[in-house]
Image (cartoon, rainbow, N blue to C red):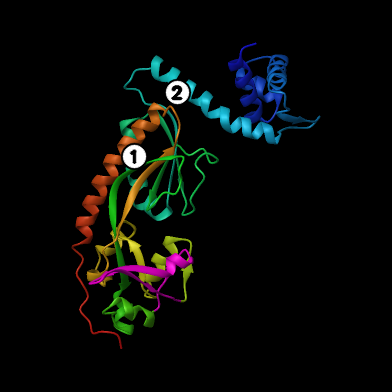
């Protein structure tokens, strides 16, 4: 019995949760599936499943083996599909993850264009401010803002988005406007993440980079929450420009301390490191590389047209 047949049977049982279901999925007889898995376990010298009369569950060895082998089978299937189909046909599932706010503003609007270009794709979009484990969540392409601390990932920077310190006009009319970053200690600063590094806002002065420790009465692990607080006049926020493009083009939200805010965050396309990248993922990556860069350039120009606030200093 060949190793490919053993692996196919093992993965089918693991994903289907049983031998009968795996047989229906693969079109094989149940005894053939059982025989293939048994041969694989004998060759490896370990039990891959815990079997009972009611269910079949992976052992620790089985889970580790599944993580290593499933991508190999997927890559082989992709290679077969790429050779047997027209090079112009891009098809199959692509799972994309992005931060919630950036995804809402810059990824979702591009999905219709992607599907019009490649109608045979099956796109699954996951929006979350949590950094997802790409392998565990089976994410093909992640779109992330800022540094990527994953040594096993492939990272491609496609654009940059400036940092901005912002507030609503109603807040500044009531509390005054900070004239220097040091003035922020007297203001209600809304913090994304609630972590130590999130409360130290970065600035640049005549002597180089420095940070100001800020505090306020609202923190959250959701950019949308901090954004809503700023729009409601609760306090001041620190964002990437890409997260506020809709708001900065209106007169209600204005940037402050522009002379001291010079940071830029990279917009990165990230995918798990592997020997073979499926054609559907390559084409999807190329699409977003072009489309996001184009979109951020356009939205950045629109945001700069927002009028500044003229007011007195802090009272």
Quarter of image, res 123: top left
Secondary structure found at label 2: helix
Q: Is residue 6 above or below residue 273?
A: above
Q: Which of marks 2 and 1 is in front?
A: 2
Q: Name the residue under label 1.
A: 112
Residue furthest right as drawn: 53
Q: Specify few, some or many for label 2: CA neighbours under 10 Å numbering under 14, 14-19, or 20 or more.
A: some
Image quadrant for the N terminus?
top right
Q: In this view, does 111 lie above or below 127?
A: above
Instruction: Tell me if residue 234 is in the magenta stretch.
Output: no
Q: Mark 2 points at which residue?
A: 78
Quarter of image, res 236: bottom left
Q: Give the mark nearest the N terminus, 2 or 1.
A: 2
Residue at image point 43% right, 70% down: 199
x then y, percent, for residue 300:
23, 56
Q: Is residue 245 above or below residue 84?
A: below
x then y, percent, for residue 289:
30, 40
Q: Specify few, some or many for label 1: CA neighbours under 10 Å numbering under 14, 14-19, or 20 or more.
A: few
Quarter of image, res 275: top left
Residue at image point 22% right, 72% down: 206
x then y, percent, for residue 241:
30, 59
Q: Which of 107 and 239 is in front in this view?
A: 239
Q: What stretch is highlighted in magenta?
A: 188-216
Image quadrant for the C terminus?
bottom left
Secondary structure found at label 1: helix
Horizontal side of 198 relative to 308 (left or right) equals: right
**Total tally of numbered discs in the picture:** 2
Q: Nearer the viewer, residue 156 or 88?
A: 156
């Amino acid at each position: 019995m060949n190793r490919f047949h053993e692996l196919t049977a093992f993965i089918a049982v693991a994903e289907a949760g049983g031998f009968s279901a795996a047989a229906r999925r693969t079109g094989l007889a149940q005894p053939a599936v059982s025989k293939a898995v048994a041969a694989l376990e004998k060759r490896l010298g370990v039990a891959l499943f815990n079997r009972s009369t009611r269910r079949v569950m992976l052992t620790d060895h089985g889970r580790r083996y599944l993580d290593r082998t499933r991508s190999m089978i997927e890559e082989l299937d992709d290679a077969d599909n790429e050779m047997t189909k027209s090079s112009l046909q891009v098809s199959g599932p692509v799972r994309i993850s992005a931060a919630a706010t950036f995804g809402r503003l810059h990824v979702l609007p591009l999905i219709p264009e992607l599907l019009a270009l490649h109608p045979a794709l099956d796109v699954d979009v996951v929006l979350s401010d949590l950094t997802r484990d790409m392998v565990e969540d089976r994410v093909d392409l992640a779109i992330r803002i800022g540094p990527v601390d994953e040594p096993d990932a492939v990272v491609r920077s496609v654009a940059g988005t400036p940092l901005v310190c912002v507030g609503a006009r109603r807040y500044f009319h009531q509390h005054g406007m900070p004239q220097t970053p040091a003035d922020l200690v007297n203001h209600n600063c809304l913090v994304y993440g609630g972590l130590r590094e999130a409360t130290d806002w970065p600035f640049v002065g005549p002597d180089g980079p420095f940070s100001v420790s800020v505090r306020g009465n609202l923190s959250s692990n959701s950019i949308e929450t901090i954004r809503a607080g700023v729009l409601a006049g609760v306090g001041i926020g620190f964002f990437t420009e890409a997260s506020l493009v809709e708001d900065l083009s209106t007169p209600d939200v204005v940037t402050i301390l522009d002379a001291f805010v010079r940071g830029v965050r990279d917009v990165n396309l990230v995918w798990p490191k592997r020997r073979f990248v499926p054609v559907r993922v390559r084409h999807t990556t190329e699409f977003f590389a072009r489309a996001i860069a184009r979109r951020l350039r356009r939205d950045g120009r629109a945001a700069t047209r927002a009028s500044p606030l003229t007011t007195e200093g802090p009272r």
